[in-house]
Image: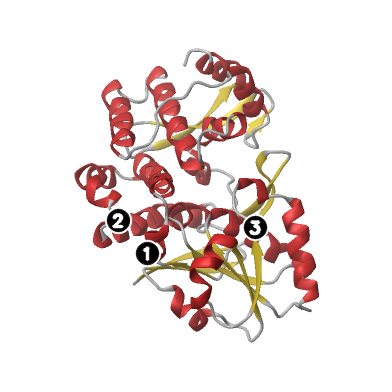
Amino acid sequence: MRTLEIKGITGTSKILVGEKLENLEDYIPAEKFVIITDENISRIYRKDFPACEIIEISTGEKVKNLDTVKYIYEQLMEFEADRSVFIIGVGGGIVCDITGFIASTYMRGVRFGFVSSTLLAQVDASVGGKNGVNFHGYKNMIGCFNQPEFVICDMNLLKTLSRREVLCGFGEIAKHAFIGSTDMCDYIEQNYKRALDLDDKIINRLVYDSVVIKSSIVNRDETEKGERRKLNFGHTFGHAIEKTTDELLHGEAISVGMVVASKLSTRKGLLSTQDSKRVEALLTRLGLPISLDTDREKMMDAIKKDKKRMGDNIDFVLLDGIGKAILEKISIKELEEVVFDL
């Protein structure tokens, strides 16, 4: 097991890469605790949970909303959970996002931690203190920044994921390489076949390296005032794709978004054509999509409602070479030209 720390305004978060669900109780710093999980995780792993009250929700992006939040509040009140309760989210990104939001708002805030059950959650949603829910279909429109006290990344939980869910996690792993490390990009290119087979040594290193990149950025900019926005590489287009089509999962949509952002980087003279093709080639090797036919008008409507928009501009992440992300304000008009030129 390897440990990293994020030191935020709301406290210190320990990321435990390689720890096991079975040891969860060793990290719970309270006598009364409640687990929030989804029906799939509950069916497969409930036998490994410590004895406590459990709140079970459905699966899928459709449940990441205020109706689910209301249901969980009601369950906590029924359990007579007071401000001393510790809440643990055991599941993927949706469970972690909802749990973090619930814990941050229930009785003005209680302590919480995560056990990440998906590759995507281990390298993205569970790390960094972003918590929130969707509103009228728009991603994470209601939320807050608050650090979990711990995040357990149990590699054994990845073995029950579908192939497609595993590939989604590699979308975010590739993103971390593209924005922060040429060495990591080289390593993925050299070991992608073993990585896709979830080779223990390879996947542990890739999760750890991803968390190193993300945690170092979060430690410098927890509340996304500047540098943390680099973690949104591919997400402006990716979220717009998610909003306008049901065809792609998050990691798949971000993959397409990264290709578009790379092309825009090349168009602006920052990224060489060769490196832009390298981005496409690596994503293709990882079994991720690099293009999609979608409604351009609907995409632009979603982009105009992006949280990163400021007036006629949007904070956009570009690549100034592999391993180096930069932030630049791009006009909505220029993005519109790119979208209709796809």
Q: Contact (CB < 8 A) between labels 1 and 2?
A: yes
Distance, label 3 to label 2, CA atoms, is 27 Å
The residue labelled by disc 3 is 98
The residue labelled by disc 1 is 155
The residue labelled by disc 2 is 198
Query: Which element is circle 3 on?
Result: helix
Image coordinates for residue 282, horizontal then vertical, percent: 29, 36
Q: Is residue 119 left or right of residue 333?
A: left
N-terminal-most mark, 1 or 3: 3
**Counting other residues with Cα less than 10 Å from the Cα at mark 1, is it few (<14), some (14-19), or many (20 or more)?**
many
Residue 174 figure quarter: top left
Which residue does the image show at 62% across and 35% down from the upper left? 308
Outermost residue, front side: 43
Q: Contact (CB < 8 A) between labels 1 and 3?
A: no
Q: Please, what is the three-letter code of the amino acid marked with disc 1?
A: Met
Distance, label 1 to label 2, CA atoms, is 9 Å
